[in-house]
Image: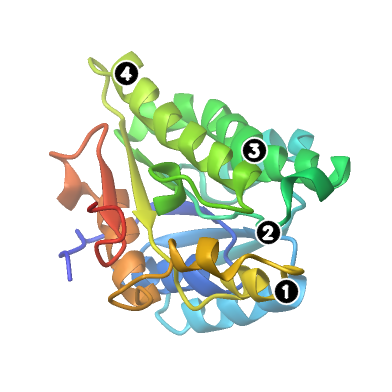
Amino acid sequence: MPAIADMHGKTVLITGAAAGLGRATALKLAAAGANLSLLDIDAGGLDQSATLAGDFGVQVQVQEVNLAETANCAPAVAAALERFGRLDALCNVAAVFFPRHSAQMSDEELDTTLAVNLAAPFKLIRAAIPHLLETHGAVVNVTSCAAFMGQAYLAAYSATKAGLTHMTRSLAMEYMHQPIRFNAVAPGGMMTALAAGLTRLEDPDPSLLGRIAPMRGLVEIDDVADMVAFLASDAARGYHGACINIDNGITAG
């Protein structure tokens, strides 16, 4: 497990924080002392995450936000700043996942995928940059192994994750000479509600699904959360423009 720097007195905004990787990341950072602004569309899950994080003695703000409405992004950053007075890291964990035969994907599903997985991270980053420059802070984007390999039935999702990966690298170049870090983590399949959606795909070709089945099994959520939290902290000061693959080797060949 990467060692997370002491985060006492610092503030981290985390999207997708109601469950899964977002919640696990929140708890890692709370354990390190960070105050948290937690975003998700699931109000009940957010409250549970806040209770668990609050047990570490940190301050927790919850924001019920629908990131498919990307006009909500800048106000969410502003709300975190109003509550805590500073922002030290932004962790873009939220994502949507609609496994579909591409010819059957609806416009609404496509628009939501593009908004939540790509446009919202950009708009959150855009709003956060001036404040992260003040604190010498960090952005951590959660992409996917799907950014590096073609995956049947996931064309839109894979495109957004590839875009988010390259966005991370491009931002790292743009801010090469300024005190802010941009990094990404690309997990393989994890046991999350998001991944469970793949089982609801109608009439898939088993031979195509087999090509993306991890030979070493699913990735542990806690392992990915450790890396996201590490990259959000000052302990990762040497990381800039990196994309860390945690996928049990699925993209190795």
Between tags 4 and 1, which lies in front? Answer: 1
Foreground pick, 101 / 224: 101
**Residue 188 image position (x, y, % from top left):** 39, 62
Q: Amino acid at mark 2?
A: Pro
Q: Secondary structure at mark 3?
A: helix
**Residue 163 image position (x, y, % from top left):** 50, 32
Q: Distance of mark 3 from mark 1, alpha carbons?
A: 26 Å
Q: Distance of mark 4 from mark 1, alpha carbons?
A: 41 Å
Q: Distance of mark 2 from mark 3, alpha carbons?
A: 20 Å
Residue at mark 4: 175
Q: Earlier in the sequence, mark 3 or mark 1?
A: 3
**Residue 171 image position (x, y, % from top left):** 38, 23
Q: Amino acid at mark 3?
A: Ala
Are the residues flagged by discs 1 and 2 in contact, CB closer than 8 Å?
A: yes
Q: Earlier in the sequence, mark 4 or mark 3?
A: 3
Are the residues flagged by discs 3 and 1 in contact, CB closer than 8 Å?
A: no
Q: Residue at x 74, y 53 (%)?
A: 65
Q: Earlier in the sequence, mark 1 or mark 2?
A: 2
Residue at mark 3: 120
Residue at mark 1: 200
